Image (cartoon, helix red, strand yellow):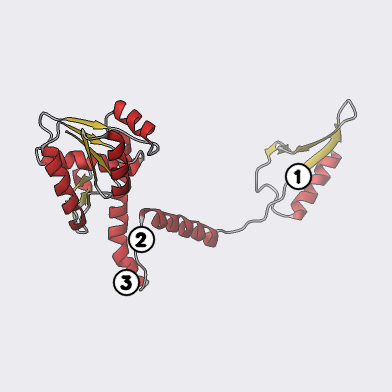
């Protein structure tokens, strides 16, 4: 018997029809475990070690999966072909390893881009390994959710009653906005003028150029602070011979 694990129970029924009697298809019903809502679930001091917990909703479906895994010669992880699906496949594999149910069993990762018989058969015939980069991306996202949201949300609740939570995206975005606002408020405007010259070249073509040096002094952004200084510079330039 081959055990195929997908996310959705609706997909499980359809895929089971395509694969036949040699396969049993069960659903994980999404993620099977998550970080518990308590201090220490992610430990930055231990290379961001993460503690996982099976939720009560998943226990019933995990029992079905573990019971079927005991009698299966091959276990096929066929969760969705995205980051979360890859993470669910990784969690299921880790859980079965912890239960010591993978000894002497083949374990494969397959993906279906559509639920048709052709796509399902093609996926089964072309297994691969779990993609570690996708799993790492999931873990980074989940760790940030926990480290930012779990620690900031209680502060938010005390300062803004009625607020639900703070997360990794809105918290960083809010900081960027407030930092930019502080820069705007602390900005001290200074007046400066620029000076350009218009002249004709040997081919009688009009050319406009910014002045870069006057009386051996380099012209910088605040060289001319007001109109009087500009007028004085214009007089000096007009007196010079070309």
Label ID, residue 158: 3
Q: What residue sits right under mark 1 in the picture?
A: 195
In the displayed structure, 220 sits above or below 227; it is above
Q: Is residue 187 left or right of residue 151?
A: right
Circle 2 or circle 3, nearest the eye? 2
Secondary structure of residue under mark 2: loop
Question: Do we see residue 205 in this rendering?
Answer: yes
Query: In the image, what residue occupies the spot 33% across and 35% down?
Result: 111
Secondary structure of residue under mark 3: helix
Query: In the image, what residue occupies the spot 63% across and 56% down?
Result: 190
Secondary structure of residue under mark 1: loop
Label ID, residue 121: none
Do the residues under discs 2 and 1 have CB atoms within 8 angstroms?
no
Which comes before the other along the chain, label 2 or label 3? 3
Query: In the image, what residue occupies the spot 9% across and 38% down?
Result: 100
Mark 1–mark 3 Cα distance, whole angstroms, equals: 56 Å
Task: Give the x, y percent position of residue 160.
Answer: 37, 71
Of residues 241 and 220, the one nearer the viewer is: 220
Mark 2: few/some/many CA within 10 Å (<14, 14-19, 20+): many
Task: Give the x, y percent position of residue 84.
Answer: 32, 44
Furthest toward the bottom, the residue is 161
Q: Residue 68: which quarter of the image?
A: top left
Q: Residue 164: which quarter of the image?
A: bottom left
Q: What residue sits right under mark 2 in the picture?
A: 166
Where's the N terminus, which quadrant? top left
Of residues 199 and 73, the one nearer the viewer is: 73
Mark 2–mark 3 Cα distance, whole angstroms, equals: 12 Å
Task: Give the x, y percent position of residue 137.
Answer: 33, 41
């Amino acid at each position: 018997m081959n055990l195929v694990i997908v996310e959705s129970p609706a997909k499980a029924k359809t895929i089971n029809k395509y694969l036949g009697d040699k396969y049993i298809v069960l659903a994980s019903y999404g993620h099977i475990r998550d970080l518990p809502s308590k201090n220490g679930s992610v430990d930055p001091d231990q290379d961001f070690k993460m503690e996982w917990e099976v939720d009560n909703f998943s226990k019933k479906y995990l029992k079905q999966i573990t019971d079927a895994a005991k009698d299966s010669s091959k276990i096929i992880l066929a969760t969705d072909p995205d980051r979360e699906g890859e993470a669910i496949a990784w969690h299921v594999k880790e859980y079965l390893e912890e239960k010591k149910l993978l000894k002497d069993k083949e374990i494969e990762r397959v993906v279906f881009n559509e639920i048709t018989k052709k796509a399902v058969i093609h996926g089964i015939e072309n297994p691969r390994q779990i993609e570690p980069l996708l799993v790492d991306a999931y873990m980074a996202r989940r760790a940030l959710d926990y480290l930012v949201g779990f620690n900031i949300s209680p502060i938010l609740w005390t300062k803004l009653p009625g607020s639900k939570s703070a997360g990794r995206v809105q918290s960083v975005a809010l900081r960027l906005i407030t930092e930019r606002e502080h820069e705007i408020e602390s900005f001290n405007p200074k007046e400066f003028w620029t000076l350009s010259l218009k002249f004709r070249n040997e081919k009688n073509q009009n050319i406009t150029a910014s002045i870069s040096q006057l009386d051996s002094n380099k012209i910088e952004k605040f060289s001319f602070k007001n109109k009087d200084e500009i007028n004085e510079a214009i007089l000096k330039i007009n007196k010079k011979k070309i």
